[in-house]
């Protein structure tokens, strides 16, 4: 029997705009006195007219572009009807069949591509607070968050493990922050996660798919991982017990209890038809011109993967590139070095990996003369091969069991010896030279 989890992710991101999605109320609702940032529009009072927030729509499109989506030429808002106490209008303005962006992808480090189905715009709901007032259990509603711009990023169910899901989420989080459309602060609820999970079970009788489950409103990467892992296990057990397979009608929604570390049934999931979507009559459709898309594309900063690729082009090993690509001060230094490569600083004089690792480890004070520090750290260090050979020999003599492993064919223990030798030389020797000396001595 072969079990393959099929994991998709819906990610909600609260955009950082001055005003809400369809009115002029402040969008920054966190920690504000309840119901002080509301107006007839975001309270859903009769006759109020929504006016779309241009900055929010641009941010939505930037997210789409950063995730390799197409921005659709034709787009519109739709009403998604459902009843919930924190939704004053009785419907949410969202996008149904013509989202701003669709058809993107994101690559994981393994090279696996995760499809992005769509990136659409909507508005947030209010917040319910369950509390006790005058000895009575009550639920209070705060509408400060009602109408705050949200973007929903919907992936295809292309992930097959919780670790792939975590990597995907971390990358999304980083991209959102890099393009500065939201802080995506998970503790403030600015990024909320909804994994969808089911499983493909292959046995002698063929392939079976378990019913689809959507896990609602998770606010940490680790909880998402735990919820997915629990759900995979639960669905396998459930299938073994009942044999029930996925149908168009048996989707369910589950919550995650982070204390008990279990998911629990909330409700059977609504179908699109239950929401009775129809075009929002108060907002005309959008025609997005190519110039607008190109302008937004130009405004995008370098994305994390591009920064890493640029560093690798400069000769930095990928593992070092990942340590420093998001540290602007280090990147500035590397920019200068890259641009001066053939003038003041001959490329041969600098081992770029050594320099990057020294900066990453804080051995070089980036605010002072980096090259002078690099020179003093590397050139004054031990370069005498006889001396280095003696140091390495001592380490080899002290570790006969690891030498034995090497002789059995575990060649990667060289890394251990390099590490020990770097320690012994206080990081002043060249790792490449050390590696050669170690390999030479080990085969003796
Ligand atoms: Zn308002």
Image (cartoon, grey):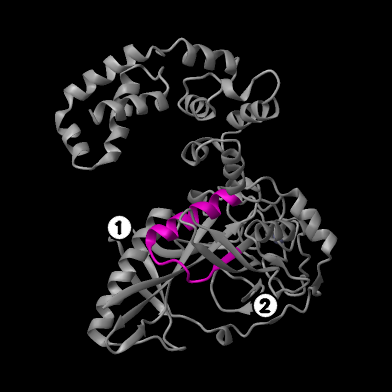
| Residue 309 painted magenta | no
165 on left or right of 75: left
115 on left or right of 363: right
Q: Position of residue 308 (x, y in %)?
A: 57, 43
Residue on which disc 2 sits: 79
Label 1's element? loop
Q: Is residue 7 above or below residue 373?
A: below
Residue at figure coordinates x 38%, y 61% from the top left: 162
317 on left or right of 234: right
Q: Position of residue 48 (x, y in %)?
A: 76, 70
Residue on which disc 1 sits: 259
Mark 2 or mark 1: name the one nearer the start of the chain: 2
| Nearest to the observer: residue 319 or residue 3 | 319
The quadrant holding residue 203 is bottom left
Q: Position of residue 87 (x, y in %)?
A: 59, 70
Residues marked 2 and 1 touching at CB (< 8 Å): no
Ligand 1's quadrant is bottom right
In this picture, which residue range is highlighted in magenta? 152-175
Label 2's element? strand
Q: Is residue 130 above or below residue 79?
A: above
Q: Is residue 215 visible?
A: no
Residue at figure coordinates x 66%, y 51% from the top left: 181
């Amino acid at each position: 029997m072969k079990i393959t989890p099929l994991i998709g992710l819906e990610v909600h991101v609260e955009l950082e705009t001055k005003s809400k999605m369809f009115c002029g109320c402040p969008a920054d609702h966190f920690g504000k006195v309840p119901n002080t940032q509301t107006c007839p529009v975001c309270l859903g009072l009769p006759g109020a007219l929504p006016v779309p927030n241009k900055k929010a729509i641009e941010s939505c499109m930037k997210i789409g572009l950063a995730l390799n989506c197409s921005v659709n030429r034709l787009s519109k808002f739709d009403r998604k009807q459902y009843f919930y106490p924190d939704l004053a209008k009785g419907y949410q303005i969202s996008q149904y069949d013509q989202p701003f962006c669709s058809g993107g992808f994101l690559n994981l480090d393994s090279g696996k591509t995760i499809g992005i189905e769509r990136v659409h715009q909507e508005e947030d709901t209010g917040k319910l607070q369950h509390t006790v007032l005058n000895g009575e259990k009550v639920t209070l509603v705060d509408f400060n968050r009602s109408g705050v711009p949200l973007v929903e990023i919907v992936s295809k169910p292309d992930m097959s493990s919780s670790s792939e899901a975590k990597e995907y989420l971390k990358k999304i989080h980083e991209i959102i922050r890099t393009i500065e459309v939201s802080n995506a602060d998970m503790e403030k609820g600015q990024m909320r996660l909804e994994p969808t999970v089911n499983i493909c079970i292959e046995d002698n009788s063929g392939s079976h798919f378990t019913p689809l489950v959507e896990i609602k409103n998770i606010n940490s990467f680790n909880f998402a991982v735990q919820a997915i892992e629990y759900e995979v296990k639960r669905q396998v057990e459930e299938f073994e017990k009942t044999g029930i397979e996925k149908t168009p009608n048996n989707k369910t929604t589950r919550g995650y209890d982070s204390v008990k570390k279990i998911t629990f049934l909330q409700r059977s999931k609504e179908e699109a038809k239950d929401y009775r979507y129809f075009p929002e009559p108060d907002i005309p459709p959008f025609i997005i011109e190519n110039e607008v898309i190109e302008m937004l594309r130009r405004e995008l900063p370098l994305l994390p993967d591009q920064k890493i690729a640029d560093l690798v082009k400069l000769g930095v090993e990928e593992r070092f590139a990942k340590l420093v690509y998001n540290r602007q001060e280090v990147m500035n230094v590397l920019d200068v070095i890259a641009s001066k490569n053939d003038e003041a600083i001959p490329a041969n004089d600098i081992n770029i990996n050594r320099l990057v690792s020294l900066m990453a480890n804080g051995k070089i004070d980036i605010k002072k003369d980096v090259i002078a520090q690099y020179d003093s750290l590397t050139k004054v260090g031990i370069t005498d091969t006889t001396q280095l050979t003696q140091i390495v020999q001592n380490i080899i003599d002290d570790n006969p069991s690891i030498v034995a492993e090497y002789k059995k064919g575990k060649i990667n223990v060289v890394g251990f010896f390099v590490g020990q030798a770097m320690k012994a030389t206080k990081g002043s020797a060249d790792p490449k030279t050390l590696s050669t000396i170690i390999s030479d001595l080990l085969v003796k």
